[in-house]
Amino acid sequence: TTKIILDTDPGIDDAMAILFAEAHPALDLVAITTVYGNATIDNATRNALYLKQKFNFTADIAKGASKPLHRPPVGATVVVHGETGFGDLTAPDDITEQADPRPAYQYIIDTVKANPGEIILVTVGPLTNIALALEAAPEIAGLVKEVVVMGGAFGMNDHRGNVTPYAEANIHDDPHAADIVFCASWPVVIIGLDVTEQSFFTGQYLDELRDDAGEVGQFIWDVSRYYLRFYSQKVGLNGCHVHDPSAIVYVINPDLFTLREGAVRVVTDGPAEGMTIQKFDDRKYMNDEWSSMPNQRVGIAVDDQALLKLYRESL
Ligand code: BDR
Ligand code: CA
């Protein structure tokens, strides 16, 4: 099995990803580390503890950053994920599960060092915790097996941002952190809107999950009602794109994705703040800075039907 730490801001599609990672036999979900984003850090952490308690996970939960490294916080995305982050649901008051005493970045450092070459970091929220971990212990770059990031939008297949015309939410929340993560010398795979918006959970697909996937299916159906209202009212679609679960799919079966290699940077301020860009040609530029940067891989296509099948069968 593959050991993963899932760094997440639960979040409706985050819950879909967490339950999927927990269900799949090829994955060992070692920990869920939380970050602000879709919800406040307190709500995001509470939501993670709620899932752990409700579904009896063994995964540790570690509480992470409450705000971006440098930019002012954007604030919880209430219109997409609701006041608590879990749509119409509110985590109960009687949660007895507790978070690890360490902050998420320290938990990540310790766990990576204790399992050299074994951990895949999967991130489906802003990249603040990962940047903090890299800053405090740069040597983890050589000890992590792979970093799989849901975030960004590179303009392939006409897909651009969802917060601004250029920026995707996870990167826009903390562009400085994302730039640190992409520029580090470790293998990063970026599963951005270019691929996540190629896969779609229809209303009917989610109804079938509810009917066939027991308590987990019912929970996903319940938590996704708010999300589907957002999609129908603001996006004009009956269903939702498959953002965060796509990163988990990549870990289970990378062959479902086509990747493009090249250095990646993030625009950290100005009108295109949070935009992700990749140098993917061999051209020599006057400014040579790009040639010395690590090559990362960016998802440009996905077998969406196989992805939907894998998700359904796992649950
Ligand atoms: C990303 O932003 C969040 O709203 C989702 O949970 C996902 O991680 C999509 O842009
Ligand atoms: Ca997320």
Image (cartoon, rainbow, N blue to C red):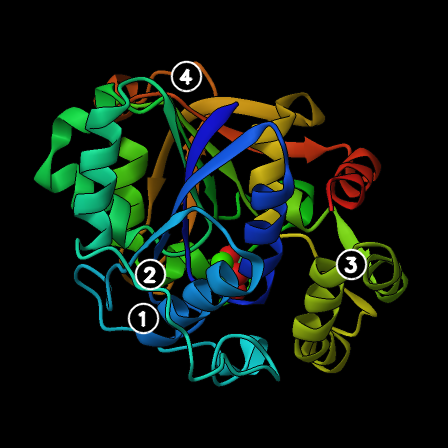
- Mark 4 lies within 8 Å of ligand 1 (Cβ measured): no
In this view, the residue in front, 237 or 125, is 125
139 relative to 59, above or below: above
Question: Marks 4 and 3: CB-CB under 8 Å?
Answer: no
Q: Are marks 2 and 1 in contact (CB under 8 Å)?
A: yes
Q: Give the Cα separation between the discs numbered 2 and 1.
A: 6 Å
What separation in Å lies between label 3 and label 2 (alpha carbons)? 29 Å
Query: Distance of mark 3 from mark 1, alpha carbons?
Result: 29 Å
Q: x and y percent of residue 69 in the render?
A: 18, 59
Q: Residue furthest left?
A: 136
Which residue in the structure is indicated by mark 4? Answer: 283
> Mark 4 vs mark 3: which is more N-terminal?
3
Please tell me which residue lies in front, 294 or 82: 82
Q: Quadrant of residue 171?
A: bottom left
Judge left or right: residue 306 versus residue 283. right
Q: Which mark is residue 214?
A: 3
Q: Few, some or many C-alpha atoms within 10 Å of disc 4 (few <14, some 14-19, many ≥20)? A: few
Tell us which disc is closer to us: 3 or 2.
Answer: 3
User: Which numbered mark, 3 or 1, is in the foreground of this view?
Assistant: 3
What residue is at 68 percent from the left and 67 percent from the top?
Answer: 219
Mark 4 or 1, nearer chain start: 1
**Label 3 near ligand 1 (CB < 8 Å):** no
Left or right: 253, with 238 as reference point: left
